[in-house]
Image: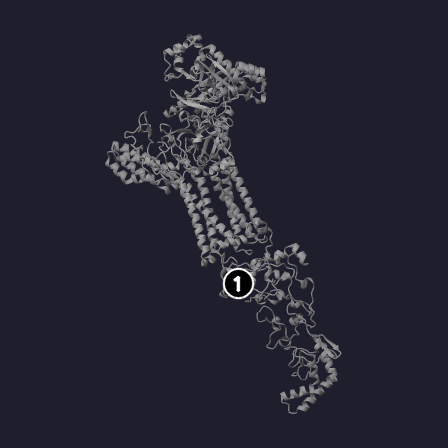
Amino acid sequence: MRRFRRQHLLGTTALIVAAIAALLLHRAFHRTLPDYAFVTGWILFAAMLVLAVYNARKKLPFLPLGNSESWLQIHIYLGFFTVLLFFIHLNFRLPRGWLDISLASLFALVAASGVAGLFLSRILPRRLSTRGGEVIHEQIAPLRHVLKTESEMIALGPAASSPAVAEFYTRRLAPFFAGPKNAWAHLFESRRPVHSLLAELEDLRRTGSEAERGALEKLADLVRRKDGLDYHRALQLTLKLWLFIHVPLTYALLIFTLAHIAIVFAFSGGAQ
Amino acid sequence: MNPANPGDNPAFEPGNYARPNQNWTCGRATEGQPCRAGPDAKGRCGAKAECRPRLEIKPGQTKGRWHCTRPEACESGPLPDGRCSRPVARCSPVPTLRLWRARASLAAVAAACAALLICLGVPPWRGRFISPGQLSQPHSSAAFAALASTNHLGGGCAACHVAGNSGPRGLMARAARARPGMGDFHGLLTASAAAPTRMDAACLECHAGKNFHHPAAPAISCVFCHKEHHGAAMAAATDAQCDFCHGNAATMSAVSAMPRIHHFATDHPEFRFIAEKWRDPDTLQFNHQLHLTSDSIPKLPGGRKLDCAFCHQPDASGAFMRPVNFERNCRVCHSLQFDPQTPELALPHGSVRFVTAFLHSLPAQYARLAKREGAADSDAFVQHKLAALRSQFGSGAELERRVFFSTATVGPEEQIGTLSGATRAVFPGCAYCHEVKAGPEGPEVTKPLMRERWLPDAKFSHASHAGIACARCHDAVESRDTADIILPPRETCLECHSPRGGVAHSCVECHNYHNPAPTVAAR
Amino acid sequence: MPAIAAMLERPQRWDAAFSPEMDDAAVEALMATAPFRDMDAGKFPKRTPLRDILRNDTRIVNFRKGEIVVRQGDYGTSAFLILRGAARVVLRPDLPPSVLGRQARGKKNIFRALAQLWNGRRPPESFRCADLMPDSRIGARLEQERVRVFLQDVPRVLDQHRTEEMTAGDFFGEIAALSRMPRTSTVFADSEETALLEIRWQGLRDLMKFDDALKAHITRIYRERALASYLNATPIFRRLDKVQLGRVAEAVEFATFGDYDWSGDYKRLAQAGTVRPEREPVIVTEGDYPNGVVLLRAGFGRVSQKAGGGERTLNYIGAGQSFGLREIAHNWRKGANPVNFQYSLRAIGYAHVLVVPVPVMEEIVLPSVPASELPALIETADEGGPSAAPAQRAPREAVGAELLEFLTENRFFNGTATMMIDLDRCTRCDDCVRACASTHDNNPRFLRHGPVGGRVMVANACMHCADPVCMIGCPTGAIHRESFGGQVVINPATCIGCRTCFNNCPYDAIRMVEVRDETGEFMVDEEMKPILKATKCDLCVENAGGPACQRACPHGALTRINLNRLDALAGWLQK
């Protein structure tokens, strides 16, 4: 952790220094520099491009373009800095025109999803590794299918002979095994749904016959394993889904930004 | 099954890799039975038959025989035409999350482009979409719209912006032609912010000319100071805009001897009338201290004590004071009666000739008075009055001399008027207040030079200072000379007009930029 | 050498004979030829008589002219004795890599690298036919279930390379077999009727042990060919002159411990869940009198110490590291109060060691080493009780006992570029796999999955082992080490899909894929059977920036790390 902490300290210090410098420059120049809004606009646009080009870097892993870790560090710190640049460009005022409002909202959404993603990326992996049962996201569905088939065999298969277990299975367990469940509970680290299911299983087991007990114990084991898969699916999906906001909206933001630039120049005092 | 051990996982066949790089997965992968071919890059199922049978032609045979090539040959064997008899059921490949994300990105791009094309392409929406904020009241008025539609640019945004009527494509063309242009970073950083732009032409369509407050001031664009789209009231110019020249040492040294000035509160010099010890050149004699403080000043009719407001009355706008006027402000006390016995008769004011004519026609004046008074014997009345005057002044010439030149209130040159009767103030002679000289054609009274404003270019309103006592700014009680200019020093203004005082203190609070203000005129 | 424990004899030693074809007649025939004719069968113990060794540990292989017997750079488990015919060893210059079945690969230039942008639409595992054509100077034929690679134009090879002929009675390949070093040169058959006796290394070891003449022969060539340069490169002998080095070489003993093909064995044992350090062959026992410094030349050793009822692993050592120097240096300096070995050393799987006896150390080596470079003295019992030396204790503490056991139990220490993923930082984004696929024609070459120890996952990616067991037995030389960087790579053109490497790899790092053509159609052979190729991570040997997976990890969670020594791992875990 030592290197990460040092990196973190360095990055945060650099960010704070850059922010202070930017604010001082803003104070010094925002009234005197000709075309100040154009200058901050171009700087903001350049920063946004650097942020966006990280995606291109990911598509070119075979070129020696620096490692992705450094890119991400730059992406994160520059991202925070760009938020400040954004406010400077707006001169710390709220936008009022429709185009400006849509631009600012897109920017806010992209930035907010980025910050959310950063937190998710720092929190969820640790939870996943603590829970264990490492599994590749694409393999969760096949594995769940295996568990479902196994559980069906135990409860309903030719060897099964207990109507009580079969009834319980079709009523309670079949929906559980049918697909991913309790995603929100897993996300908030609540084990209550699976505990109540296991408690019901346990109730049934206590009153069951020898054969039923065996079947129910096996089913409880399968439920736990299925729950592990659900947990991994919920968290791994969250780790992927935030990018569904961050990435597409970045494209929209870039297009709106280009339109903004064109309009600003077409409507500038110097437009011909 | 232990997920940590890939060997136990049906999905981790020893002969294959997990392939998150692909956009499609086999539709049957979720059931743990992906086919070995898998979908292609476009998401088409690649499933074919389980094997590709092999044709074996033995020597001497013509047709040959098809053989199954699976590791364990199936019972059914290949069909006669060489196809495998066990086709693999085809699936509908499933797009991966990654492909969904790519699709979402594509959708976002499409939506953004569509939104922009609609908002920029449909004229009534375009202006509202692009406008960065509310226009100032005059520029959003119907009158302006009517005016703008008559000029060569056209109405709407186009009244000011050349690109105002352009669609998406026109916008791009206009943007490309802008100066400084998109790629002209040098121009952006170095071009003078105040340089006139193409847009000034639009302003000048309605506003007559740019009048600059200093001939040496460079041509400055309208929009440098007048920021539009910032609400109903167009924002006033800020100190920064003045600072552009006045804060710039090079500019100032080239243009005038004025020092650099950034703010009124910080480095504005003392007002010139103080710094340069100006004196009021007026020849009229007036002692503010006497009039405001002396007990000898009688009360005004109605018992009111003489105060500032009696003489200094605001004009119609309330901004400035009307000039002091003899008839309105002085005569109530200084009634110009020359004959102590006849207070009803007063000298005319305003012209030496009238006074001379009046004195020369004294018998007629008395006769008219007698008639007004209804005296029974008009001639006797006149003779009586003239005799009284003659006994006091000796001769008509002496009377005339005393009327013009006497300044004495006591002694042999004693006042010609008295304090008793209808008059309130003594009238020793014109020279008591005026500068009177003896000229070749008789006495000459220098016309008083009443300066209405000492700071003619400054904006000031007495009305907005109504709550403040006059004496807070005008130290009239201490002034005994007409030459005193009783205006406050900068320090007095700063008591309020400074960050400390909390009242507005920008340059434009007092100073006018345009000189005179441009007018709006339709062409 | 009392401290060098007896080699572990496994009861199942001859459960599977080397070749079923070695019948009594063949053994009798062998017994009549040199050198077995001259061996004293009486010296062999009852459990491993000479005849049984010949029956179970040897086989006769026939080669035709031009067929390659051993390739330079290959790892082999057996030595050869020429029975009939002749063989030629290529001395100088070496045969070109493509003739040896290998692929000369350089870094991709910018255009070839950029061309990979369009890889995304390629079907998985698709190859151009041209890429799968081996060098035209070699041919291959299948003979008795064995693939034989032969040189198409022997006269030309003789013309261009200096070679030396070997005839009946000559041994070759014994050093590589015993010391697990790559073959130093290529040998091909030089007569149509060449019969070679292939002796697997266990047999060779026993023969050597009980026959003095053979032992003397092998020891002599070992010392002549391999030892001098090795000793020269060992830091502790750095200050010795040529004469002194020669004396050291004369005195050095060498021995091989454990099981040469431990990988398959290990896989079996691991699946049965019976891997126990106590069953590993002991090289040095804790508490024995130190009689020599152990230099590990190949393989790995586990350093352990008695603790409670069992033993705990303190560290493992790999090739190039030594064991026991501290004790011997201590005894040399404090002769009055000698200490015994403080730790035990066991071969993990397999270890080839050199032992420099104490007298040589004390007379020649230690006096040449400045006191500052000698290891610290050991605090003996009367000076404050025995304690683990800091140097040995540190790795256990830095890495953590749990992870150390995990790495040792799974034998991950073998890797020089093991893919480790810190699961506390990994967001499971698969950027590493995608980067891998982009650099390998749209094919991932590892699986982002594998055993997890603590917060670390060792993914199923080739570790580029220090001891590459996968390379043993490749019939065509397709799997080989890059001559420059030492990465273990597979040449798809010469890979025949025989699964040998796949079966050998204990880490599931090699995958057999069915190759396709550029349209996505599976390639088949004449019998319409799919063509298999072994594939694995090549550490982006052609990629200008190094391993794409490591560079593609946004969170610094993935690393390719050398686990031969623990310091790199300790550094990474601390970061």
Q: Is B259 situated above or below C564? A: below
Residue at 32% over, 24% down: B59
Against A169, residue C348 (above or below) is: above
At x 69% / y 65%, what residue is drawn? B278
Q: Residue A183, how many percent across, how many down? A: 37, 42
| Color scheme of the displayed model | one colour
Looking at the rendering, in which quadrant would you find the N terminus of chain B?
top left
Residue C1, percent across and down? Answer: 48, 13
Identify residue type, mark 1. Answer: His
Residue C110 x/y as whole percent:
51, 36
Q: Which residue of the protein is positioned furthest toward the bottom in this rendering?
A: B377
Q: Quadrant of the C terminus of chain B?
A: bottom right
Circle 1 sits in a helix, a strand or a loop, which is it? loop
| B515, B287: nearer the viewer | B515
**Mark 1, residues whose alpha carbon is within 10 Å: few (<14), some, or many (≥20)?**
few
Rendered position, A151 above or below B235: above
